[in-house]
Image: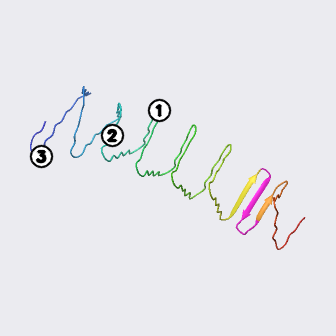
């Protein structure tokens, strides 16, 4: 214990273990900074809830792993930003559901790949615009539709049926039927 002016210090030293038990409430009020150093591991068990009064910042200098035994819920009143320096992997064992209240956009600098093992259904309430810079190819089995930026449209299939309920209009400078 040091009580000299400008050098006030209360120091407790345990040669091996130290255990503190409080039978009711414990409160610590630090007016300026608080620093704790743990040489190896730390376990904090909170019975019901842990609350931060205003801002909270956590810095982990290496890896961090969180295990939740049941459900996890995150409520953010305003914006949520996540920055990832390298890759992000998301594994969902069962279903995944996302609801967006307004708009959604995505920017991919490289290649965007989607593999759906069964079916994919898209329902659009108003308009759908697909703009492709060079070429678009749709292939189902032996059927193939290709559209290129020079205006060439190629339709290949074992059997092609054209059915116009009222009429089929053909406008062309030249028609070749083989």
Does the magenta portion include 149?
A: yes
Question: Mark 3 or mark 2, which is nearer to you?
Answer: 2
Alpha carbon distance from label 2 to label 1: 20 Å
Local secondary structure at mark 3: loop
In the rendered image, which residue does mark 1 sit on? 70
Of the numbered discs 1 and 3, the one sitting upstream in the chain is 3
Mark 1 or mark 3, which is nearer to you? 1
Q: Earlier in the sequence, mark 3 or mark 2?
A: 3
Q: Are marks 1 and 3 in contact (CB under 8 Å)?
A: no
Foreground residue among 80 and 14: 80
The residues colored magenta run 141-152
Real-space Cα distance between discs 1 and 3? 50 Å
Location of residue 103 in the rendering, given as x and y in whole percent from the top left corner: 52, 56
Give residue 55's position: percent from left, percent from top: 32, 47
How many tags in the picture? 3
Which numbered disc flags the more N-terminal residue, 2 or 1? Answer: 2
Q: Which mark is residue 6?
A: 3
Q: Is residue 170 above or below residue 9?
A: below
Write the residue at 24% across / 45% down: 33
Q: Which residue is mark 2?
A: 51
Q: Is residue 45 left or right of residue 174?
A: left
Say whether residue 54 is magenta. Answer: no
Residue depicted at 55% across the width and 43% down the height: 97
Graded by Cα atoms within 10 Å as few (under 14), some (14 to 19) or many (20 or more), the crowding at tag 1 reads few
Q: Residue 17: name its quadrant.
A: top left
What is the x, y in percent for residue 159? Answer: 85, 54
Q: Given contact means CB atoms under 8 Å apart, are the residues at marks 2 and 1 in contact?
A: no
Q: Nearer the viewer, residue 28 or 62?
A: 28
State the separation of the CA atoms marked 3 and 2.
33 Å
Q: Residue furthest bottom?
A: 173
Residue found farthest to the right: 178
Taking the spot 58% from the left edge, 39% from the top edge, the residue there is: 95
């Amino acid at each position: 214990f040091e009580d000299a002016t400008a050098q006030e210090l209360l120091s407790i030293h345990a040669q091996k273990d130290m255990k503190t038990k409080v039978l009711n409430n414990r409160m610590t009020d630090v007016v300026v900074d608080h620093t704790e150093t743990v040489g190896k591991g730390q376990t904090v068990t909170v019975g019901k809830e842990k609350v931060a009064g205003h801002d909270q910042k956590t810095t982990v200098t290496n890896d961090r792993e969180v295990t939740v035994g049941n459900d996890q819920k995150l409520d953010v009143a305003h914006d949520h930003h996540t920055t990832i320096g390298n890759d992000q992997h998301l594994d969902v064992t069962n279903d995944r559901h996302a609801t967006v209240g307004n708009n959604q956009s995505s920017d991919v600098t490289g290649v965007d790949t989607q593999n759906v093992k069964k079916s994919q259904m898209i329902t659009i309430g108003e308009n759908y615009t697909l703009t492709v810079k060079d070429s678009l190819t749709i292939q189902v089995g032996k059927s193939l539709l290709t559209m290129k930026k020079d205006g060439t449209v190629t339709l290949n299939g074992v059997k092609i049926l054209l059915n116009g309920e009222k009429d089929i209009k053909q406008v062309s400078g030249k028609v070749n039927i083989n």
